[in-house]
Image (tube, grey):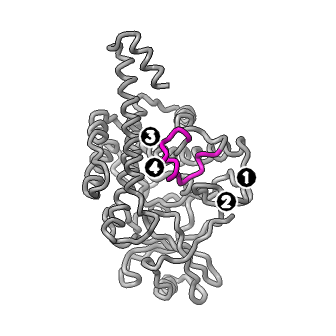
């Protein structure tokens, strides 16, 4: 039931002896050499468990063949979590950061292992939650996100240095447009319509706060004694100062539900299918009601979240396509990117139809038919 690591992939081995020697130079007295295993859940940075006789640690490092410079910054990821230690109870304890490439060939950091359940595509077989418990789990995960967004970052110099803040929405649209085009392979869509629509519908920032930027169920750790309770949040590599609605929109890109296309349902990586789980629309309503924020341009945030997810998946698939990784989990990412594209186009079509209807430009009978189609 507790989340476990598995065998280290042949192309992603870790020099445990070098890591152990370095830890000792940092005053961390690990006993003997570690048993090293690797977590399979992450699709970006590589994550290992180091089991020593006297310590149980986690090591994070960037992948080989990295395409995006900012997406695998170990120094930044370490410092973000260190800066949040006093303000956010779900951050793992940081142990040590290494910026000496001579140790294992790249930056890496070591942190405390949180012992708990990571809810991936399906909950462990030993756990059966009733619909009411599923709803509690769902609200607790969203509440943890809201709690992060409500941190007064201006009181912490380390947090104020996380990002530029103002102008976040525009920078993200421009940035992901460039990143997607740079990582594009011949077998995926161009997202031309989506990219142009985002630029035309760009809103002003709703407000600025600390955002996680990769909020998913499989990035939270649940209490093994009460699997509806969040005890940890992982994978802070993309955390920054930004618009909280962008963070929510990005989170909902992963939120697969029953009416999504078949490929999206088959590629689901979190248990949002469980009876009692909120729909995406219910999540948005819950978040907005609890924070008192408005949703005048929600379609933008949801479409952006999908385009961003496509960009992340494409950057990963680019490495597989160019034989920089042999992880079989990435083999069909190109197909998932097509499914994301279809979902984004559907959202845009729905939004544009509603906009036309609300403008009163369609004859009443057509408005009535269109509204029925949109239900």
Percent of width and height locating residue 332: 42, 59
Q: Which mark is residue 128?
A: 1
Front tag of 1 and 3: 1
- Secondary structure category for the residue under label 3: helix
Q: Secondary structure at mark 2?
A: loop
State the separation of the CA atoms marked 2 and 4.
31 Å
On the question of residue 152 being in view, the answer is no
Question: Which is nearer the N-term, disc 1 or disc 3?
Answer: 1
Say which residue appears at 64% left-offset and 61% top-offset: 117
In the rendered image, the vertical position of residue 292 relative to residue 147, given as above or below = above
Q: Earlier in the sequence, mark 2 or mark 4?
A: 2
Secondary-structure class at tag 1 = loop
Q: Which residues are magenta?
A: 258-274
Residue 343's image quarter? top left
Between 301 and 19, the one lying in front of the other is: 301
**Residue 263 within the segment the image draws in magenta:** yes
Q: Which mark is residue 253?
A: none
Would you name the residue on which mark 4 appears? 210
- In three-dimensional space, the C-alpha distance between marks 1 and 3, rounded to whole angstroms, equals 32 Å
Assign the N terminus to one quadrant of the image: bottom right
Q: Nearer the viewer, mark 4 or mark 3?
A: 3
Residue position marked by numbered label 2 in the rendering: 124
In magenta segment, residue 104:
no
Pointer 3 residue: 245
């Amino acid at each position: 039931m507790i989340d476990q690591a598995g065998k280290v992939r042949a192309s992603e081995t870790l020099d445990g002896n070098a890591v152990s020697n370095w830890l000792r130079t940092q005053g961390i007295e690990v006993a003997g050499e570690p048993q090293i295993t690797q977590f399979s859940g992450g699709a970006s940075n590589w994550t290992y468990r180091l089991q020593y006789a006297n310590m149980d640690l986690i090591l994070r490092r960037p992948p080989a063949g990295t395409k995006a410079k900012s997406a695998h910054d170990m120094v930044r990821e370490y410092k973000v979590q260190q800066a949040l230690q006093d303000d956010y109870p779900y951050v793992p304890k940081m142990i040590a950061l290494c910026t000496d490439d001579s140790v294992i060939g790249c930056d890496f950091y070591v942190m405390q292992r949180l012992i708990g359940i990571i809810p991936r595509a399906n909950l462990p077989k030993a756990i059966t939650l009733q619909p009411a418990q599923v709803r509690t789990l769902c609200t607790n995960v969203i509440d943890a996100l809201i709690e992060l967004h409500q941190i007064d970052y201006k009181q912490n110099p380390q947090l104020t240095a996380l990002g530029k803040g103002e102008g976040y929405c525009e920078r993200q649209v421009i940035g992901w447009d460039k990143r997607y085009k740079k990582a594009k392979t011949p077998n995926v869509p161009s997202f031309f319509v989506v990219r142009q629509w985002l630029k035309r519908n760009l809103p002003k920032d709703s407000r600025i706060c600390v955002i996680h930027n990769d909020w998913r169920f499989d990035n939270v750790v649940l209490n093994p004694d009460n699997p509806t309770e969040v005890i940890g949040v992982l994978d802070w590599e993309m955390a920054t100062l930004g618009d909280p609605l962008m963070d929510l929109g990005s989170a909902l890109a992963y939120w697969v539900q029953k009416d999504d296309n078949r490929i999206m349902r088959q590629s689901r990586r979190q248990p949002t299918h469980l009876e009692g789980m909120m729909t995406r629309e219910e999540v948005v309503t819950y978040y907005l009601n609890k924070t008192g924020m408005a949703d005048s341009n929600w379609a933008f945030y949801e479409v952006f979240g999908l385009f961003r997810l496509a960009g992340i998946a494409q950057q990963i698939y680019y490495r597989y396509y160019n034989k920089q990784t042999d992880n079989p989990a990435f083999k069909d990412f190109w197909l998932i990117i097509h499914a994301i594209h279809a979902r984004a186009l559907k959202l845009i079509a729905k939004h544009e139809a509603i906009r036309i209807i609300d403008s009163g430009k369609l004859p009443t009978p057509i408005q009535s038919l269109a509204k029925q189609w949109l239900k």
